[in-house]
């Protein structure tokens, strides 16, 4: 087990393909929080997120066992791509059945906070929490494609090249979606008289 903990994600994936089930357990431990956070950020529904999380890992297992994983040094990006496809399939199913219910979720606020904010005064902390809450609320009003770009760029620190690969669009389209997301958020902030500046 110690040996597994020292392996890269890619090495673990190949170990699992070669029959080592413990390698997949280690992979799951490493990636589950990030994958689940990504899914719940997009769908905003715990029950749906749990289903999509399980679907993502079942698809990953199936693809690994079928030899459809190529060691590119980006296992986590490969997993995000599978999650992305599962989410898009879910949205397509929802569109055929009617509207999508997406209750507001407070999960991401804590993850948006910068550690340096904690060194400021209590008043500043409260003001910054309000700004982050306002930003999260603004993100809710963005189209799904823009919401997804914001998540990948600012939560997962992915490059626009990686975002383009994950979403199956060109880099220019990714850049365009981010540009429109920022424009829309600024417009919404102005309309609602929000000051989106951290103290």
Image: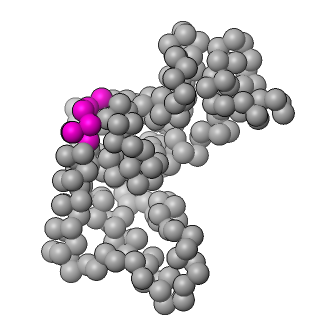
Give how far across and how far down residue 166 sits, in percent.
37, 33
Q: Give the range drawn in magenta.
A: 168-174
Give how far across and how far down residue 98 sits, in percent.
22, 40
On screen, residue 170 above or below 71: below
**Per the image, is 58 magenta?**
no
Q: Residue at x 21, y 67 (%)?
A: 186
On screen, residue 160 above or below 194: above
Q: Which residue is drawn at 72% across and 12% down?
A: 19
* Residue 40 in sight from this viewpoint: no
**Per the image, is 173 magenta?**
yes
Colour scheme of the rendered structure: one colour
> Is 80 situated left or right of 119 in this image?
left
Give the number of callouts. 0
> Is 141 situated left or right of 122 in this image?
left
On screen, residue 152 above or below 65: below
Give how far across and how far down residue 142 sits, in percent.
24, 55
> Is 64 situated left or right of 136 in this image?
right
Which image quarter holds the N terminus? top right
Give how far across and how far down residue 97 sits, in percent.
25, 35
Q: Which of 12 and 111 lies nearest the eye of the viewer? A: 12
């Amino acid at each position: 087990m110690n040996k597994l903990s020292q392996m890269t994600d890619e090495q673990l994936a190949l170990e699992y393909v070669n029959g080592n089930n413990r390698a997949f357990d280690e992979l799951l431990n490493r990636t589950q929080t990030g994958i689940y956070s990504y899914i719940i950020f997009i769908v905003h529904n715990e029950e749906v997120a749990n289903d999509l999380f399980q679907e993502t890992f079942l698809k990953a297992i199936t693809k690994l066992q079928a030899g459809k994983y190529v060691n590119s040094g980006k296992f986590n990006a490969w997993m995000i791509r599978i999650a992305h496809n599962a989410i898009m399939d879910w949205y397509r199913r929802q569109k055929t059945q009617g509207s999508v219910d997406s209750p507001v979720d407070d999960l991401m606020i804590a993850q948006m906070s910068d550690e340096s904010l904690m060194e400021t005064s209590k008043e500043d902390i409260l003001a910054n929490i309000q700004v982050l809450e306002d930003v999260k609320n603004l993100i809710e009003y963005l189209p799904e494609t823009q919401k997804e770009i914001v998540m990948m760029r600012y939560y997962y620190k992915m490059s626009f090249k990686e975002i383009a690969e994950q979403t199956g669009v060109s880099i220019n389209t990714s850049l365009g979606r981010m540009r429109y997301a920022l424009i829309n958020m600024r417009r919404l902030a102005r309309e609602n008289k929000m000051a989106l500046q951290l103290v």
